[in-house]
Each structure stands twice: as C-alpha cells, then as structure tokens.
Image (cartoon, rainbow, N blue to C red):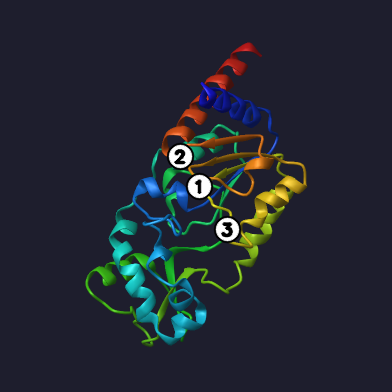
Amino acid sequence: MTLDRDLERAADLILAARHALAFTGAGISTPSGIPDYRSPGAGLWETMDAMKVATSASFRADPAAFYRLLRPLAARLLLAEPNAAHRALADLEQWGLLACIITQNVDNLHQKAGSRCVWELHGHLRQATCLRCQRTFPAEGLLEDLLQGVDAPRCSCCGGALKPNVVFFGEPLPRYAWMEAAGEAERCDLILVVGSSLEVTPASDLPFMALRHGAKIVVINNVPTPLDEEAAVVLCDDLAVVLPRLAEACRLRLGTERRTR
C-alpha cells in the first residue's frame, strides 16, 4: 500500500509540473542486460581499476587495455534493447509531461525507446574518433571488430587508435550538452532521478542544482541516494516495474482531466 500511495503522489507531482525532466543513470539500463559500475559483485569497477583503463592518458598509452574491458560488453551493447523503464519515460515525453532526459548513459537506449530530447553528459557509443587524424567512424563496426578478436580497433585511413566518443575519467563533459542540461536543471520545477547513485560529478550535481532552484525531487532507484532525504517521493524498487506503473497512473489521470475539461 505504501508503494501505491507513493506512486499516486509521484503522478500528482508530474501532472502538476510545468517543466519536468528526468535524470538517468546506469540503473535504468541494467534490466536491458547492461551492467552498472558499482553494484557489489556485478559492477564493472568491481574487477577493474577505472583509473588504469578509462582515463584519456591510459587509453593513449594502451588502447588495448580499455578494449579488453569493453570486449565482454560488446555483444550486450549490440543486442541491448530498451526496457519498460526506457519506454515509460518516452511515453511521458510523448504525452507532454516530460520536457527532456538528461542521462549519464552512453548506450543510446533512450533514443531507441523513442525519447526525442536527450542530453548525453558522458557522450555515446554511436561513433568513435581517431586520435591521430580526428576522423569519425560508426562505433557499431568497432564493437563487431572486438567480437571478432581485434585487440584495439584502428583507423582505416591512418592507423591511429579509435577512441569511442564517450567521456573518460578526467575529461571535460561535452560543452553544449552540459550547458543545455544545466539550463534545464535551473528552470525545471520537477526532476525524476532514475537509476543513478549520484556519485559521479559533475553530472550528479544537476539534481542538486535543480533542488536549489526550487524543484521538487522524485527518486526512482533500487538503492538509496544522497537526495533521498530531500525528495518529495522516493520509490525504491525495480525500475522496470515502477516506472511503467507511474507512467500508467499519469496516463489514466491525464485522460480523466481531458475528459472533464
């Protein structure tokens, strides 16, 4: 019964908001088969030192080390499909209840689900760039090369190392995406924090920025976050179950409101 009440409260907040947005992290994609980074026993950084393989300097020194980390994920990334949580956010946007999604993810699943306004703070895996000649290439071929046993994909033009267009540790966030996302956080009156531990800065600063500017917070996550005590509603449960239920509650209420106008 508590979950039902919290879902109703969250739906009320979404329907009352003038400018709502979602901030998503790795947890929204785990039901699609993509592991997160810090879950005990399953996170990527449980078995790998991120600072040794996922910094700009370490990649330039030894691209193969990074690709050894990426290889076990290549098949999952190529085959991954949006889950019910991704589709629920796309529905909320389509119904005019969600202005945009700000994501820490690089997997393109929000776009595959149908979301149109997505700000990718940590880049994406759709392309890779040659560190020598700066040409860009579709990353799908890069992932397929990994599955074929290629140690470190190289540029077909100059032989330079191909770096996926994702943000490595120590690199700045994409300037335009950050500016747009920060602007959204400052003017929103509701932010849904979905599947993020809020541990990776500066991206994780945005929900706190929204809070400082008066926005209400709805946290939807399966583990506690630093924002839980400040949130208007906390839904701690399976995202792929809770978000579709929340979207359905909004749809039903939206339909009722339209019929009574």
Q: Is residue 17 left or right of residue 159?
A: right
Upstream in the sequence, badge 1 or badge 2?
Answer: 1
- The answer to whether the residues at label 3 and label 1 have Cβ atoms under 8 Å apart is no
Residue 17 in percent (x, y) is at: 68, 33
Q: Is residue 42 left or right of residue 173?
A: left
Query: What residue do we see at 46% from left, 58% from top?
Result: 38
Q: Nearer the viewer, residue 43 or 23?
A: 43
- The amino acid beneath tag 3 is Glu
Q: Which quadrant of the structure image shows residue 67? A: bottom left
- The answer to whether the residues at label 1 and label 2 have Cβ atoms under 8 Å apart is yes
Image height of 58 relative to 88, above or below: below
Residue at image mark 1:
195
Image height of 163 relative to 143, above or below: below
Query: What residue do we see at 46% from left, 47% from top?
Result: 28
Residue at image mark 3:
199
Residue 123 in percent (x, y) is at: 51, 64
Quadrant containing the C terminus is top right
Q: Report if residue 110 is visible in the image.
A: no
Distance between the alpha carbons at the discs numbered 1 and 2 = 7 Å
Residue at image mark 2:
239
Helix, strand or loop status at disc 1 = loop
